[in-house]
Structures are given as C-alpha cells and as structure tokens.
C-alpha cells in the first residue's frame, strides 16, 4: 500500500501530460524524442533498411506510368468509414476562471449562469440590468457577462485569462463588503450570493421599478392560499404575494417522485395542485383548536429566465433523472409553442471532502466543457460525446466526472424569454381566478405585469378581523383570513 501511494504522484503527472497532449497542447520542446516518427514522415517507414529495392526493369526505360497497375491507387483515396484520422479538434479548451483563495464557489456559479445569460444579453441583461443603480452588484454582473461575451476564449493561454480573474476578484470583494452579507472573508464559501443580490429590498413589498425586471431574471414570486373545513364554517387564509425562496429538492422529494425532476417541476407549477397540511393553521403554542383537514395551494406568478435548481443530500439519497427539457405547462402545446419550456445549460458539482466546486456547461457552439479552476490554468476541458449522459440523464451515471463529485445544482434557460414569462403568468392567474376564486391586482407603474396583491373574490365569505384571529402571535400577520358567511349542514360536516 505504501508503494502505491508513492506511485500516485507519477500517475497524476503523466495523466496531466496525457490529457494535455490528447487535446493538442505541446508538452515537450526541443528535438523530438519519438525519432522514428520523423523517419516515417521522410521515407514512409520507421526504418530505412526496410525500404524495398526498386526494380530496375520497371524504371530503367524512363517511361511514364502507362499500365493499369501503375495508374490505379494502391490505397484508397479516402479512409474507410469509421477509420481514425488522428485529427485533433481545435476547440479542446476554453478560457475560464483560474482558482484563487477559495474562489471556486464564485467561479462555478459565474460559469454556470453564463450559458443562459449570454443568450439573453441583448434583450434582457443589457437593457434591464443597465438601469439598476450604479453601485448595485447586478451592474457588476452585467459588465462581467459583457466582458466574457466579447473575449475570445478559444485559445489556451498560459497563466489563464487575467481579465476574467480580475473581474471575478473585484466582484468577490464587492460582495464581501455588502451590508448584511453573511460572509466577511473573501476566502469563505458562499454559494447563494445570487439569491442575496437579487432579493427585493423588502420581501413584503414589490421591488422598485428599476430593479423589477433584473430581479425577475433569477427570481420568482408566488402566493399561498389555504383552505380548511374543520369548523361549522369553512375558513381560508391568503398570504401576501412574496418573492419565493430558491428551488431546492430533497431526498424525500426524490423518493416521492421516483427521481423524476420533470414530474416534480410540473406539479410545483400547477396552480390548482392541492397539498395536504399536517394541521390547520388555527393553533397557538402547540394547541390545536381545529381538527379539520387543511390543504394549501401555491400559485406561481412568474418564472425566472435562468432557473437554478439546487439538490440537497444527493450523495445520501436516490439519484435524480435530469431531463433535457422542463415544461412548466406540460401538455399545453400552445405554451410550448410560445417558448414556455426550459433547456438544460449547466451543472454545478461539489466535492465534500475538499469543499470544492466545479462546473459542466454547454458552450455557444453546443459543446460540453468541464471547468475546474484548479486545473489547466483555469481553462475548461471539452468532453466528447452526446449531451445525453453528459448534461441530461440519471445523476449518478453522468459520464467523465472526477471521483468524489456529486451534483449540487442544475441551471435551465427559458427558451421563450420575457414573452414566454408573460404567457405563463397570464395562464396562471386565469386558472387561479377560475378555480380558486383569487383576484389579482397589478400596480400601474409595473414593467413586468406581475401582480402585487390579491384577495379572495367570493360573495359567500367575509374577512376575519384581527381581533378574532386569536391564533396570531402579537396580533400581527402578513396574511388575510376569511370565513364562510353561512354554516354547513350537519351532513356536510360529517363527511
């Protein structure tokens, strides 16, 4: 065992050389050590003494070749089908972020969101991020995407791409200096920085108009509606429209949906999908005063252009099936025709033993690259093969992943852009109004059309005054309670 450990550095050294050589990188300078290849290039064989003697009878007359045998090629003009030509693809590497002081959390997230943001730069990123306040981190992110778009990253550059590293370091220092940011050291891990800089100043209020569209690019908002039949009167609770927390899936959800990320997402987006609650919300200090069956609905009012789904406990749970396409309105051909569908563009992987991140992404040329800032001077390495098995497929069977890395996040891009988001929002509100009797209102100054408030639009209910909501702590709540104005019959209560 000790001997094998001593051999490990040699294996790693030659593995690096092999990877570099296989991608066209020169690993030796000076006279070629493979001298037989030079000989073969000159005379067609590796040894001169193997050259057959020429036949004097065939060449002494100095006549040009005029026989069928001399004129016909002895070897095919084109190689046989499937034959290896030995040509090395020129796009084996792509520039990226070189690791520096635990920067992998920022490197991975910037690399992962770029394939989505680059497609939306002209129509969304530039016009909508450009109007946010100058000191806002979203301005730095916009400039970062602009620089990467306008930098040719196709060449392998010794030492890495300095311009990307400098911008990355500047963004990291700005994040650490933000008021309320949970990390105070540039060498500390922080994987949810996008969530931090895109949160509204007040989650209870609509975001400022100049931030609205930029926040919508990564974020989503929803409203939760609850219903219970446990007393003589049906009662309901409607929460305030809020900006939603990130999309995170757990091992429990994986088992419930049998690993189907597509089924989970479709269920989540359905406005009339009822979820059973453990108990009615009318409880105080652990004491329940209602024995009814309570259910709740979550109605999404917008979907992000760059959808980030995080995986919790993947290494301890069952694998997820990562689809190539996600459909918020599955089965709705009109929605799909409007671009209300997501395409996978990148993965983020995590190695627990080293607390290290790496990224796999789809380039603008539709090629898959792996980026690990600690390797190859920060350059991403191309992975050959079909997208299936590299970017979509069962999470624990994805190809060419280094040992110890597990899936941490997946990024999807909304194909139809802002127009697809508007179509989705109109569809959601129409269904919620029809089936849940919710009524939405939008402020006149809004550029997105996302509702800012809603109420229960039924003639047989009334608002419960705060004085009657004894289950509230300190009498404060961000929700509104309703109760039916007529009691149910004993027969209905029995059911």
Image: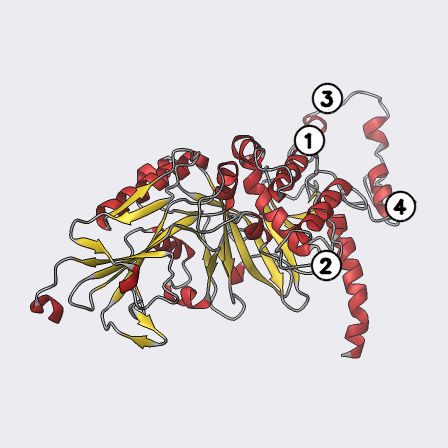
Q: Where 73 sits versus 285, above or below? A: above
How would you rate the neighbour count of disc 2 (Cα within 10 Å): few for under 14, some for 14-19, many for 20 or more? some
| Separation of marks 1 and 2 at Cα, in angstroms | 65 Å
Q: Quadrant of residue 286?
A: bottom left
How far across and down, in percent of the image, does residue 114 sit?
Answer: 59, 42
Q: Earlier in the sequence, mark 1 or mark 3?
A: 3
Q: Residue at x 42, y 45 (%)?
A: 303
Q: Which residue position holds label 2?
A: 187
Q: Quadrant of residue 230?
A: bottom left
Q: Earlier in the sequence, mark 2 or mark 3?
A: 3
Report whether 471 appears left or right of 322.
left
Q: Which residue position holds label 1?
A: 73
Q: Which residue position holds label 3?
A: 66
Q: Secondary structure at mark 4?
A: loop
Q: Which residue position holds label 4?
A: 29
Looking at the picture, tell me which residue is in the foreground, 312 or 32.
312
Q: Secondary structure at mark 2?
A: loop
Q: Where 218 sits versus 100, above or below? A: above
Which quarter of the image is occupied by the N terminus? bottom right
């Amino acid at each position: 065992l000790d001997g094998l450990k001593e051999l490990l550095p040699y294996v790693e050294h030659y593995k690096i050389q092999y990877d570099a050589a296989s991608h066209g990188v020169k690993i030796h300078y000076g006279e070629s050590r493979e001298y037989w290849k030079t000989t073969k290039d000159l005379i067609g064989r590796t040894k001169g003494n193997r050259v057959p003697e020429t036949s004097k009878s065939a060449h002494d007359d100095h006549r040009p070749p005029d026989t069928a045998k001399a004129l016909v090629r002895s070897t095919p003009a084109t190689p046989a089908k499937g034959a290896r030509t030995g040509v090395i693809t020129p796009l084996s590497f792509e520039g990226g972020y070189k690791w520096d002081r635990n920067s992998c959390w920022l490197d991975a997230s910037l690399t992962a969101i770029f394939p989505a943001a680059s497609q939306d730069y002209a129509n969304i990123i530039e016009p909508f991020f450009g109007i946010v306040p100058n000191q806002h981190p979203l301005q730095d992110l916009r400039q970062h995407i602009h620089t990467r778009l306008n930098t040719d990253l196709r060449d392998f550059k010794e030492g890495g791409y300095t311009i990307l590293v400098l911008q990355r370091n500047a963004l990291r220092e700005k994040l650490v200096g933000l008021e309320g940011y949970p990390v105070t050291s540039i060498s500390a891990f922080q994987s949810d920085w996008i969530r931090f800089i895109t949160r509204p100043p007040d989650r209870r209020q609509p975001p400022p108009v100049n931030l609205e569209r930029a926040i919508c690019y990564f974020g989503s908002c929803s409203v939760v509606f609850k219903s219970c039949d446990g007393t003589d009167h049906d009662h309901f609770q409607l929460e305030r429209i809020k900006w939603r927390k990130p999309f995170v899936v757990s091992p429990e959800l994986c088992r419930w949906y049998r690993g189907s990320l597509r089924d989970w997402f479709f269920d989540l987006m359905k406005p009339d999908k009822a979820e059973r609650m453990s108990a009615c919300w009318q409880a105080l200090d652990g004491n329940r005063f209602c024995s009814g069956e309570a259910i709740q609905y979550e109605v999404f009012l917008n979907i992000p252009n760059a959808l980030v789904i995080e995986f919790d406990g993947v290494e301890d749970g069952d694998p997820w099936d990562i689809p190539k396409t996600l459909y918020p309105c599955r089965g709705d051909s009109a929605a799909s025709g409007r671009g209300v569908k997501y395409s996978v563009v990148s993965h983020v992987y995590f190695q627990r033993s080293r607390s290290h991140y790496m990224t796999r992404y789809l380039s603008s040329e539709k090629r898959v690259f792996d980026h690990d800032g600690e390797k190859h001077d920060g350059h991403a390495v191309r992975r050959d093969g079909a997208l299936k098995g590299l970017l979509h497929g069962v999470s624990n069977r994805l190809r060419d992943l280094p040992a110890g890395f597990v899936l941490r996040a997946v990024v999807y891009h909304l194909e139809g852009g802002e127009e697809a988001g508007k179509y989705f929002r109109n569809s959601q509100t129409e269904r919620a109004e029809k089936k849940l009797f919710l009524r939405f209102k939008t402020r006149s100054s809004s550029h997105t059309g996302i509702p800012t408030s809603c109420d229960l639009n039924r003639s047989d209910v009334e608002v419960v005054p705060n004085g009657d909501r004894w289950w509230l702590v300190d009498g404060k709540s961000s929700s509104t309670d309703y109760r039916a104005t007529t009691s149910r019959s004993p027969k209905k209560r029995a059911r």
